[in-house]
Amino acid sequence: MRVRGRVAEGARGIGGVAVSDGLDVAVTGADGEFELISHSGRRFVFVSWPAGYELPRNVPGTARIHAPLEAGPNGEASLLFQLAPSRQSDENHYCFLLADPQTEDRYEVERFLNETVPDVRELSRRLSDGPPLGIGCGDLMFDDLTLFPEYEKAVHRMEMPFFQVVGNHDLDLGASTHEESTRTFQGHFGPDYYSFNRGAVHYVVLNDVFYFSGGYIGYLGKEQLDWLEADLRLVEPGRPVVVALHIPLASSSVTRSQEPGRRLTTMVQNRQRLHRLLEPYPAHVLAGHTHECEHVFEGNLVEHIHGAVCGAWWTGPICYDGTPNGYGVYEVRGEEIRWKYKATGRPLEEQMSVYARGADPSAPQEVVANVWNWDPGWAVVWYEDGERRGAMSRRRGSDPLSTELHAGAELPQRRPWVDPVQVDHLFYAPVSAQTREVRVEATDRFGQTYTGSVRLG
């Protein structure tokens, strides 16, 4: 099908804008006009929305940078994308990354609406020095896709344009092919991969959940990767690129769990090609899926794996690595990107849990701090009764609260299959018997210092 169209601001065409059907990528001329030949089976044409223009939204608030691909009476499609200038410069902006809301029933929907949504809205209003955008990073549902309208209700209340990533629990599980598995998802949100721009950042959303009858693996299909290669040709080297997908590229959870069978479902099998495509750019990959916090640094690429909005599947206040239910917050200042983790219902300045001596039975004389969003650029030290003692020792272990809430065949009551996991962001300090208070200071790679304390005996 021949597709002719125009990208315009009022009567003025906008040149140099990428337009695609998910296979071919066309670029608008100086008059804003484009033409492409679409292939059979393509459902949408989408615009790699340029920076400096308002992100249009559907009625529920989800972003709409696409149009359905339908032939007119002459067998061709004609499309017009009208853009409006941003009311606020997007050179500085915020990205809210919500991984794994994963609501399965009314109880979980109400928690999402009453806990997460007001928290996001309040923080967004506080961070008023740049416009916000949101990304739902997959597993918006827990298999019951009739609840998608409840997610849309949540987006509407958060008062920002939201982009959606498809997760393994967002699929039509009765589909006979991978291509058909996202039909319901696309009916609500549009294409399952695309790109857009805010300020200096080029954002890409990918679908890395490859479905087959009876299961899924982490995998990026050839059509999608070929499209991404064409899309990135239009992005100048050195410009920051942010990629959102559901299954992490290289989570260490497989090694920590000592369950090699999980490798297919918790890592992207052909991630090397994505790495190669991203080599010319300072790149950030945003992922969910594992319900725990982790940051993986590899060359020019930083992968951020997020704790879940639902924590340990709405069983309580934390994920099974001890990270509170919450979401990621990315602050963009020109080409600089900074990140934090926001625990739902807690101040943004709270970034750790500190446990009394003996909370970890394997270290009876040591205080334990779980620094949820730790990465190798952090420094963690401790004080005893106000006196600095030095750097804490990072060791692999289980969060004490997670052990209390999740360990055992009967716990937690709502999901007895949830168990504590071994994590790499626990810090230990041998504390003298006379100490009455321990204070932990953790300084992130951006120079921001956070504190936590515990009273002893």
Image (tube, helix red, strand yellow):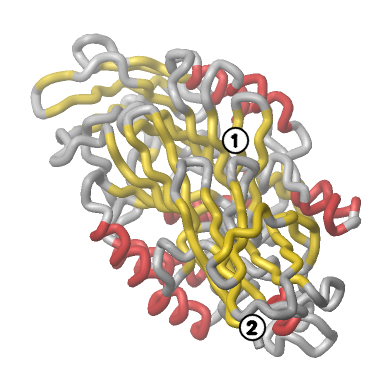
Q: Quadrant of the N terminus?
A: top left
Residue 254 at x, y = what percent? 83, 52
Q: Residue at x 65, y 66 (%)?
A: 369
Instruction: Looking at the picture, tell me which residue is in the foreground, 289 or 374.
Output: 374
Evaluate whether residue 207 shows in this view: yes
> Which of the 4 image quadrants contains residue 286?
top right
User: On screen, 259 above or below 338?
Assistant: below
Is residue 59 at least partly visible in the picture?
no
Q: Which residue is more in the foreground, 263 or 186? A: 263
Camera-nearest residue between 277 and 30: 277
Residue 153 falls in which quadrant of the image? bottom left
- Tell me which amino acid carries mark 2: Leu
| Residue identified by numbered label 2 | 456
Residue 208: % across, % down: 65, 42
CA distance separating discs 1 and 2:
38 Å
Position of residue 79 measured from the top left corner of the image (x, y, whole percent): 28, 30
Q: Residues within 10 Å of mark 1 (few under 14, many from 20)?
A: some
**What residue sits right under mark 1 in the picture?**
302
Rendered position, 192 above or below 128? above
Q: Secondary structure at mark 1?
A: strand
Q: Is residue 62 above or below residue 345?
A: above
Q: Is residue 74 left or right of residue 174?
A: left
| In this view, the mark in front (1 or 2) | 2
Does residue 432 appear left or right of residue 254 in this picture? left
Nearer to the camera, 99 or 42: 99
Considering only order in the chain, which callout, 2 or 1, is on the residue closer to the N terminus?
1
Label 2: state its secondary structure: loop
> Would you say 24 lies left or right of 379 here?
left
The residue under the point 40% across, 75% down is 113
